[in-house]
Image (cartoon, rainbow, N blue to C red):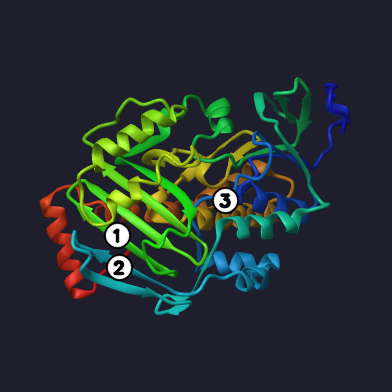
């Protein structure tokens, strides 16, 4: 495909598709669309795959989708050992804990490093999908017979379909549906995550959480690295510059300086570099995920929230459900998009509702009443995280 010419509708590949975003949603969507016979082009604004972040839980329907993709064996080969999740008090006494086993009452469950899952998915499309880094969509123009995308390098191309798989701050969503803030459901808090080499702060293959009303500190330990996490609740949204790392560090220090447990040692790692993630705890809730020949997959259309730990799973499930709908309606994208949304939305809304209540209140109790309810659940072993 030329890189600097505008293609006429007569030359448009009839089953060409553009996938924006090369994370789990984009890679899985590209895999399925290629398998369905589409000519797939992917664009990613970053210079390479976005690496780092916490491991991903693979369970339920996600396993079934990965099995259909022929990738579950590769995932199992990279599965992390079982871990123990413990809630701690200021003196490091355990208030309650649970084991994370590969096979529990809910069925098989696997945990895999995010980078490993990225490599598995990316390897599955290598040589079959054109992946262009350092490029993003700057304009989209819809017509009945095709949709054109203008890219950041000035080129413009036409496609049969566009799939926005570019995360909870989706550029595709903004271009097609308008200002993303109208679809953002703020969940009353903010979180920070930094991955560092092994700190010795906790044993490998374990997670620990310490909380006081409105504030939470979490550690996830692995053989060679440690996740340092902080979360805090707020009555409303706060003003901050998402590009200003110093300001974000100050926000964390303001909320966590003076706390006990392992918090002082955790804070000591904050100034090592700017490789950390800070954002509000939020969900994406939209009345529809599709418009004309454009649809959204994963966090771009239905972010559950980082505290639910299901972003990767929802992305893979969403890609599989979209592929199923397109396979049933190969010549009718409108019917396929409708079927995709009608089938998946009830599940998404159920998971979002559970995350909005249970996940946030369990990990970051907002007040003494929520702390008491959390402790009651810990005492009877009713832990759900």
Placement of 123 over or under 111, stated as above or below: above
- Residue 282 on image: x %, y %: 37, 41
Image side of residue 183 versus residue 45, left or right:
left
Q: Is residue 363 in sight in this rendering?
A: yes
The quarter of the picture where the C terminus appears is bottom left
Q: Are marks 2 and 1 in contact (CB under 8 Å)?
A: yes
For label 2, the SS is: strand
> Foreground mark, 1 or 3?
1
Q: Are marks 1 and 3 in contact (CB under 8 Å)?
A: no
Residue identified by numbered label 2? 86
> Foreground mark, 2 or 3?
2
For label 1, the SS is: strand
Residue identified by numbered label 3? 340
Q: Is residue 343 in sight in this rendering?
A: no
Foreground residue, 253 or 291? 253
- Residue 297 on image: x %, y %: 57, 45
* Residue occupying the point 46% across, 75% down: 82
Q: Are marks 2 and 3 in contact (CB under 8 Å)?
A: no
Placement of 216 over or under 175, stated as above or below: below
Label 1: how many Cα within 10 Å (few below 14, some 14–19, many 20+)? many
- Residue 225 on image: x %, y %: 49, 59
Label 2: how many Cα within 10 Å (few below 14, some 14–19, many 20+)? many
For label 3, the SS is: helix
Foreground residue, 320 or 75? 75
């Amino acid at each position: 495909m030329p890189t600097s010419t505008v293609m006429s509708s007569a030359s448009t590949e009839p089953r060409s598709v553009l996938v924006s975003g090369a994370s789990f949603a984009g890679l899985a969507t590209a895999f399925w669309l290629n398998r369905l016979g589409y000519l797939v082009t992917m664009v990613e604004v970053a210079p390479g795959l976005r690496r780092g972040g916490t491991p991903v839980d693979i369970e339920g329907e996600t396993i079934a989708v990965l099995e259909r993709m022929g990738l579950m064996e590769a995932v199992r080969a990279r599965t992390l050992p079982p871990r123990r999740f413990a809630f701690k008090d200021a003196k490091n006494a355990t208030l309650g804990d649970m084991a994370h086993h590969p096979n529990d009452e809910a069925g098989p469950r696997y945990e895999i490093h995010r980078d490993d899952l990225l490599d598995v998915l990316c390897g599955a499309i290598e040589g079959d999908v054109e992946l262009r880094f350092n490029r993003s969509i700057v304009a989209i123009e819809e017509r009945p017979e095709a949709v054109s995308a203008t890219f950041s390098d000035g080129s413009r191309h036409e496609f049969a379909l566009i799939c926005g798989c570019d995360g909870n701050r989706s550029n595709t969503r903004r271009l097609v549906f308008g200002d993303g803030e109208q679809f953002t459901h703020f969940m009353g808090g903010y979180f920070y995550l930094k991955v560092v080499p092994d700190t010795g702060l906790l044993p490998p293959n374990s997670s620990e959480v310490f909380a006081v009303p409105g504030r939470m500190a979490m550690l996830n330990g692995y053989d060679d690295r440690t996740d340092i996490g902080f979360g805090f609740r707020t009555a409303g949204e706060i003003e901050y510059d998402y590009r200003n790392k110093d300001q974000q560090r100050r926000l964390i220090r303001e909320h966590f300086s003076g706390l006990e447990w392992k918090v002082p040692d955790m804070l000591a790692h904050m100034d090592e570099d700017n490789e950390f993630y800070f954002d509000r705890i939020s969900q994406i809730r939209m009345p529809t995920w599709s418009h004309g020949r454009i649809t959204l997959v994963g966090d771009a259309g239905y972010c559950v929230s980082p505290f639910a730990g299901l972003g990767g799973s929802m992305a893979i499930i969403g890609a599989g459900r979209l592929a199923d709908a397109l396979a049933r309606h190969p010549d009718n994208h409108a019917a396929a998009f409708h079927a995709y949304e009608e089938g998946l939305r009830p599940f998404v809304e159920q998971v979002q509702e559970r995350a909005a209540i249970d996940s946030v209140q369990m990990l970051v109790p907002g007040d003494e009443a929520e702390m008491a309810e959390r402790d009651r659940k810990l005492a009877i072993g009713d832990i759900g995280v």
